[in-house]
Image (cartoon, rainbow, N blue to C red):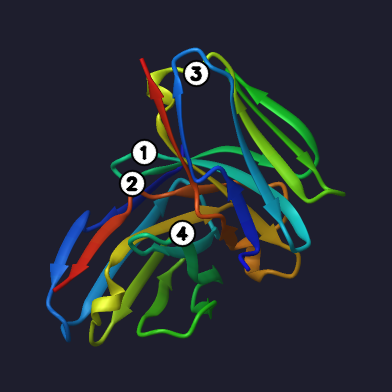
Amino acid sequence: SQTIHQWPATLVQPVGSPLSLECTVEGTSNPNLYWYRQAAGRGLQLLFYSVGIGQISSEVPQNLSASRPQDRQFILSSKKLLLSDSGFYLCAWSAASGRGYEQYFGPGTRLTVT
Amino acid sequence: KNEVEQSPQNLTAQEGEFITINCSYSVGISALHWLQQHPGGGIVSLFMLSSGKKKHGRLIATINIQEKHSSLHITASHPRDSAVYICAVIRVGGGADGLTFGKGTHLIIQP
C-alpha cells in the first residue's frame, strides 16, 4: 500500500533562517507530487507541483522553492524565511493527471516563523 | 472573488441532524474533491466527483456540472463528524491536477 511521509511535524524558525521540508512517498512510482500551504485564517493554496524528477512548476511567486531529486522525494526550501511563511504545509501525491485520480495528503508540517 | 465558494462557513448542529454543506465554483473543472480536515491538521479525501452522486456510509456527495454546484450531506450526524470540510476543484487547464480550494466549513456536532 502507498504511504506518504512528511518531516518535521512541527518547526519553529527565526526570520531569515533557511528552511527544508521533506516529503517522501512509498509504494508507488512516478507520482504527481504537490506542495500546499494553509496560512492562518486562510484556505489551502497550491504552491508547487511536479510530474517527474527535476520537473517543478510554481503556482504563485514567493520566497520558497521546491525540488524533486528522486522519483518519490519532494523538498520545499527557502534561503531566508519571512514571517509570512508561517503556516501548515501539506505534501500530497496522485497516481497521474486526469480526473480519475484521487490525491492523498501527508500529515503536514506546522511552521512558525518568529 | 474566490473561484471556489463554500457555505456555510460555520455550522453547529445537534447529534442526529441531517447536514448539508454547499460548494459553488466559477471555473471549468474536470473533477471536484470533498476533503475532511481534523483539528490536528491532517486531511483525508472523502470523495472525488466528476458527475452525479457518490455515497460512502453516512456521507453523500452530489455534483451538478451545469450549475457548477456540489453538496456534501451527512445523515445521522455524530460528534465524531466534527471537522472542517473542504471543497476543492481540479481546474480545466490547471497544472497537473493541482487543487483549488474553498475556505472550508467548520462543522461542530453537539451530543
Please state if A97 lies on the left or on the right of A27 as rendered: right
Q: Give neighbour class at mark 3: few <14, some 14-19, many 20+ (Cα, 10 Å).
A: many
User: Which circle marks residue B54 in the picture?
Assistant: none
Q: Amino acid at mark 2?
A: Gly
Kindly state the secondary structure of the residue where label 2 is placed.
Answer: loop
Of badges 4 and 2, the one in the foreground is 4
Identify the mark nearer the N-term, 1 or 3.
Answer: 1
Mark 4–mark 2 contact, CB under 8 Å?
A: no
User: Which of these two is toward me, B8 or B64?
Assistant: B8
Give the spatial CA distance, label 2 vs label 3.
Answer: 21 Å
Residue at 68%, 37% in the rendered image: B71
Residue B98 placement (x, y as % from top left): 59, 63
Residue receiving disc 3: B77
Q: Chain of mark 4?
A: A
Residue with the mark numbered 1 = B38
Q: Which of the chains bears the disc numbered 3?
A: B
Are the numbered discs 2 and 3 placed on the same chain, yes or no? yes
Write down the residue under mark 4: A43
Q: Is the C-beta separation of discs 1 and 3 under 8 Å?
A: no
The percent coordinates of residue B12 (x first, y second) are 44, 30
User: Do marks 2 and 1 share a chain?
Assistant: yes
Circles 2 and 1 in contact, beta carbons < 8 Å: yes
Do marks 4 and 3 share a chain?
no
- Identified at 36% across, 44% down, the residue is B42
Residue A33: x %, y % from top left: 50, 62
Toward the viewer: B85 or A110? B85
Whether marks 1 and 3 lie on the same chain = yes
The type of residue carrying mark 3 is Ser
Label 2 crowd (10 A; few <14 / some 14-19 / many >=20): some
Q: Are marks 2 and 3 in contact (CB under 8 Å)?
A: no
Q: CA distance from mark 4 to mark 3?
A: 25 Å
